[in-house]
Image: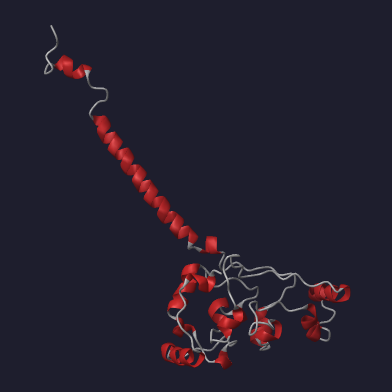
């Protein structure tokens, strides 16, 4: 005689897991889902944080060049050292001769300038370190921005207040696209391109006028920066 399927013995013999295990599985699946969501949030926050973008980390150059002293105190124009910023893709690094043109007479025996003197005497260029090092797949042309009205401080920050220059904005794709979608608020008259202290009373109005004068338009196509 077979067992009655409704009998307690029949029910017990066919149950592999107790009822509370269902709650355990649901809780485990919920924990996995929450953990995955938290991981995505953490990854998103990390890749947008200065820990990843390397913002505000001073770069130690081969020579202790203090921008505060040269730019703020003595008013040296950015283009004196970065000579190709208006006509080339790169802003350019100053050759040792540029440093020597001043320091051959000023502080010419200072121990801080020993590296410069060694470079001059041996004809070996100084190896400056790049502060804003974009990815190889990103195309950026300094002259295209400077000649259209984008000031140095917009991308590099107040270098006149930096002892050692560091990356100021994140320089990521989102940051660049924000400007490319609405460039007006970052535009200024050509005569103030290198000014560190210039501020517009009405940024949008002035930016719109500069954009019209320099034929500036929004640029959001992939080929603008990826060529």
Give whichever of 147, 192 is nearer the camera: 147
The correct choice, above or below, for 197 with respect to 129 in the image is below
At 46% across and 83% down in the image, what residue appears?
217
Residue 14 image offset from top left, x and y in percent: 22, 19
Split into 4 quadrants, where in the image is the C terminus? bottom right
What residue is drawn where x is 73% and y is 79%?
94
Residue 117, percent from left and from top: 84, 76
| Foreground of the two, 178 or 127 | 178
- Answer with left or right where residue 195 lies relative to residue 61: left
Q: Is residue 123 left or right of residue 40?
A: right
> As drawn, is 137 to the left or to the right of 29?
right
- Seen from the viewer's position, the closer of residues 139 and 45 is 139
Q: Residue at x 49, y 60 (%)?
A: 47
Q: Vertically, is 39 above or below 81?
A: above
Asked which quadrant contains residue 56, the reply is: bottom right
Q: Which image quarter is the N terminus in?
A: top left
* One can see residue 133 in this view: yes
Specify whether residue 111 is in view. Answer: no
């Amino acid at each position: 005689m077979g067992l009655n399927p409704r009998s307690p013995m029949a029910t017990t013999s066919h149950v592999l897991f107790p009822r509370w295990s269902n709650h355990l599985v649901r809780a485990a699946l919920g924990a996995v889902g929450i953990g995955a969501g938290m991981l995505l949030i953490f990854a998103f926050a990390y890749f947008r944080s200065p820990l990843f973008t390397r913002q505000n980390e001073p770069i130690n150059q081969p020579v202790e060049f203090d921008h505060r002293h040269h730019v703020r105190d003595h008013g040296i124009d950015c283009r004196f050292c970065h000579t190709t910023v208006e006509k080339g893709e790169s802003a350019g690094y100053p050759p040792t001769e540029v440093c020597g043109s001043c320091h051959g007479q000023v502080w010419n025996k200072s121990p801080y300038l020993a590296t410069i003197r060694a470079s001059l005497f041996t004809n070996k260029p100084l190896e400056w370190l790049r502060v804003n090092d974009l990815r190889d797949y990103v195309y950026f042309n300094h002259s295209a921005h400077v000649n259209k009205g984008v000031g140095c401080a917009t991308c590099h920050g107040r270098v006149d207040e930096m002892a050692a220059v560091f990356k100021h904005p994140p320089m990521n794709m989102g940051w660049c696209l924000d400007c490319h979608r609405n460039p007006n608020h970052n535009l200024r008259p050509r005569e103030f391109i290198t000014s560190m202290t210039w501020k517009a009373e009405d940024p949008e109005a002035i930016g719109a006028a500069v954009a019209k004068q320099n034929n500036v338009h929004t640029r959001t196509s992939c080929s603008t920066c990826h060529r």
